[in-house]
Image (cartoon, helix red, strand yellow):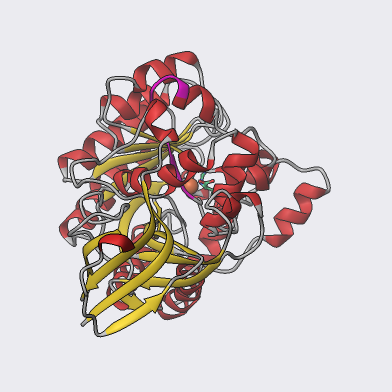
Amino acid sequence: MSLLIKNIKELLQVRDSHISVVKGKDMKILPSIKNAYLLIDHDTIVDYGSMDDIQNLDADQVIDATGKMVLPTWCDSHTHIVYSGNREQEFVDRINGLSYEDIANRGGGILNSAEKLQNTSEEDLYQQSAKRLQKVIKLGTGAIEIKSGYGLTVDAELKMLRVIKRLKKEFPLKVRATLLAAHAIPKEYKNDKTAFVDLVINKMIPEVAKEQLANYIDVFCEKGYFDLEDTERILKAGKEHGLIPKIHVNQFNAFGGVGVGVKYEALSVDHLEEMNIEDIDVLKNSATMPVALPSCSYFLSIPYTPARQIIDAGLPLALATDYNPGSTPSGNMNFVISTACIKMKMTPEEAINAATINGAYAMGIGTMYGSITKGKKANLIITKEIPSYAFMPYAFGENHIDNVIINGQII
Ligand code: NIG
Ligand code: FE
């Protein structure tokens, strides 16, 4: 099966295979070919170039993309899409004056979602999550990382991870799984957090590693949740079992969590709404990707990750949704990109780099996803007819996507 896309107005994010991260000033460059063609064989990108150079290409199927852009699908490297029910009452409570912290302190928030999930069957949880996944694929997401963390018991965390495994099997997009057992302190451990951290280390990590249910280990490193020592212990144990660190840090408070992430060679440190100069410094000379989640800042009305400061320091940056019922009930990467441009002063080139090639890096799939490169998976967005790629973030809140192609198949 071959598929030729011809007369592409502009083919975006065309890269050599050795480029795996884009950082600093280079983030302002988005390599492209105008008036281009792209050839797919089965699930793989095999050729592309200018229409002027097209050689009498024969294909089983041809798409005419006149007036349209083609780019790699979004790589959403941070989500919690496996959850049960929603939390719109807490949303209303926040409108009426309560803070995210107030709600958590009265037993709402993550603990509210954990109770719902514990009482939901695995089949029901799968069905609820599958609907969300279908929705985000139509919005252009072709690779996604999904976390556990609304289970908080051994059984419920395993249930979440089995649901992620089934999503991986039943859906064509790329799925990576993360164990986020240390997401909140369960009620039963309120006065003995160390016992819960011990449970994570001695029971959950070994079990999950043995059943190969996760690629990554995550911790919510935050005041009132898990401190630096807890984070270190969990990351160390995770690494000993082959799980790569990828952590939640600096969402509400900056107290050195980024340094701990770097010390344990985290693939990414995510959130970063609160950043000290030491956090920026420690990321230099590391292979850790900073990840910003602007939809979370938007929804909670908290500061945006200082993208300019991060990029202007020569660092890379990735963008992801954080899709979850509490802080970001949206998995729309197009909105993320618009918001990054509008609120974080990222240029469209920086935002697209952050959501594709750097997103792929932040989920460890850069060799096969995140750019238009020969040999990579044919996961593509074909836009509607638009005047330029800057029009995508500019005309925010509108759907500019005409077609999504995953593994060479039109969705
Ligand atoms: O990434 N901050 C921690 N975890 C999620 C929110 C969890 C929730 O409120 O349900 C986040 O924002
Ligand atoms: Fe998150």
Q: Position of residue 180 (x, y in %)?
A: 38, 49
Does 107 appear above or below 58?
above
| Stretch in magenta | 312-320
What residue is shown at x 55% (from left), y 51% (from top)?
Answer: 110
What residue is shown at x 41% (from left), y 64% (from top)?
Answer: 8
In terms of depth relative to the viewer, which is nearer, 248 or 191? 248
Whether residue 58 can be seen here: yes
Whether residue 327 can be seen here: no
| 313 falls in the magenta region | yes
Q: Position of residue 139 (x, y in %)?
A: 51, 66
Check the picture and name the quadrant holding the N terminus.
Answer: bottom left
Q: Position of residue 40 (x, y in %)?
A: 24, 71
In terms of depth relative to the viewer, which is nearer, 200 or 258? 258
Is 395 placed left or right of 409 in the picture? right
| 245 falls in the magenta region | no
In terms of depth relative to the viewer, which is nearer, 268 or 172? 172
Q: Quadrant of residue 294?
A: top right
Q: Position of residue 344 (x, y in %)?
A: 59, 34
Check the picture and name the quadrant holding the C terminus.
Answer: bottom left
Q: Quadrant of residue 211?
A: bottom left
- Most extreme residue toward the bottom, as rendered? 60
Does 292 appear above or below 181?
above
What residue is shown at x 27% (from left), y 20% (from top)?
Answer: 285
Does 5 appear above or below 299?
below
In terms of depth relative to the viewer, which is nearer, 68 or 398? 68
